[in-house]
Amino acid sequence: MAGADPHGASDTAPSAAAVPAKRSDLPVRVASAVVMLAVAGLAVWRGGVALDAFIALVGLVVFGEYVRLVSRIAPDPARMGAAVITGAVYVGWGALALIVMPTPLLVAVMGLVICTDTGAYFTGRALGGPKIAPRISPSKTWAGLAGGMAAAGLWTGLFTLGGAWLISGIGPTGPSLAEALHIANLGVAALAGAALAVAAQAGDFYESWLKRRAGVKDSSRLIPGHGGFFDRVDGLLPVAIIVGTAWALGAPA
């Protein structure tokens, strides 16, 4: 019969079912996230020198990834040197801010950034809409930013209320939700959280801009399914700088 394959195979293209489906990296991403949270949680629980060393180590790795990115961008040694100095100040300031702030504030900052990323991701996926800066980060939308701000505001409000509830326990009647609501300024806390969410997204955009100029998808491949450490803390750095500096300036001598 004309056109028949001598080996008995069809001369038509293989069906879609015959093409292996692309494996999802979700299990790898989840496993890596669990490990990262466990290690960070252990460092926070131990506190002291262990926590400071953990933050310093992560900061050094992030700085190395920053240098890797700018080395692909800088056209000459002079600009490379300026970029390295800028990165040293940026990453170093963020790491130092995390080290000097008290542990409860550190937990608040980390929770805020996580809530911002989570709120922005799910709101952006659900609502879509206009992009903020498609040439820098095509997936970021205004709806996602609003969702991230709302989630961060909710987090800071609840965290502040929890702290006020613990403080109210010092009184003779023990912990009181009514007293906590009286102590806590939830409106200011929520607005501060929403504003810091914008800073977190700005840090995300900054790293995305660097990666786009460098022509890479991730800052490195150190974390399976997540890229590099810079990819994980890009939003944390500006928030840490703002909160840590404000706390240091307002802390009693």
Image (tube, grey):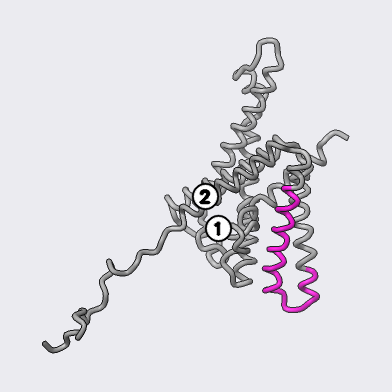
Say if the magenta span includes residue 57: yes
Name the foreground residue: 155 vs 88: 88
Which label sits on residue 83?
none
Residue lying at the far top of the rendered structure = 172
Q: Residue at x 63, y 71 (%)?
A: 214
- Name the quadrant of the N terminus: bottom left
Q: CA distance from mark 2 to mark 1?
A: 9 Å
Q: Residue at x 17, y 87 (%)?
A: 3
Contact flag, marks 2 and 1 (Cβ < 8 Å) = yes
Q: Quadrant of residue 156?
A: top right
**Mark 1 residue type:** Pro
Looking at the rendering, the stretch of residues picked out in magenta corresponds to: 54-82
Residue lying at the far left of the rendered structure = 1
- Going from N to C along the chain, the mark reached first, 2 or 1, is 2
Name the foreground residue: 179 vs 187: 179
Q: At numbered mark 2, what does the secondary structure look like: helix, strand or loop?
A: helix
Q: Residues within 10 Å of mark 1 (few under 14, many from 20)?
A: some
Q: Residue at x 88, y 35 (%)?
A: 253
Question: Horizontal and vertical percent for residue 128?
Answer: 44, 55
Q: Is residue 198 left or right of residue 15?
A: right
Q: Which residue is mark 1?
A: 224
- Position of 209 relative to 155 (above/below): below
Q: Is residue 85 left or right of residue 236?
A: right
Question: Horizontal and vertical percent for residue 69?
Answer: 67, 68
Question: Horizontal and vertical percent for residue 202?
Answer: 63, 55
Q: Which residue is mark 2?
A: 31
Question: Horizontal and vertical percent for residue 74?
Answer: 72, 74
Name the foreground residue: 230 vs 48: 48
Type of secondary structure dominating the magenta stretch: helix
Q: Quadrant of residue 21?
A: bottom left
**Mark 2 residue type:** Ala
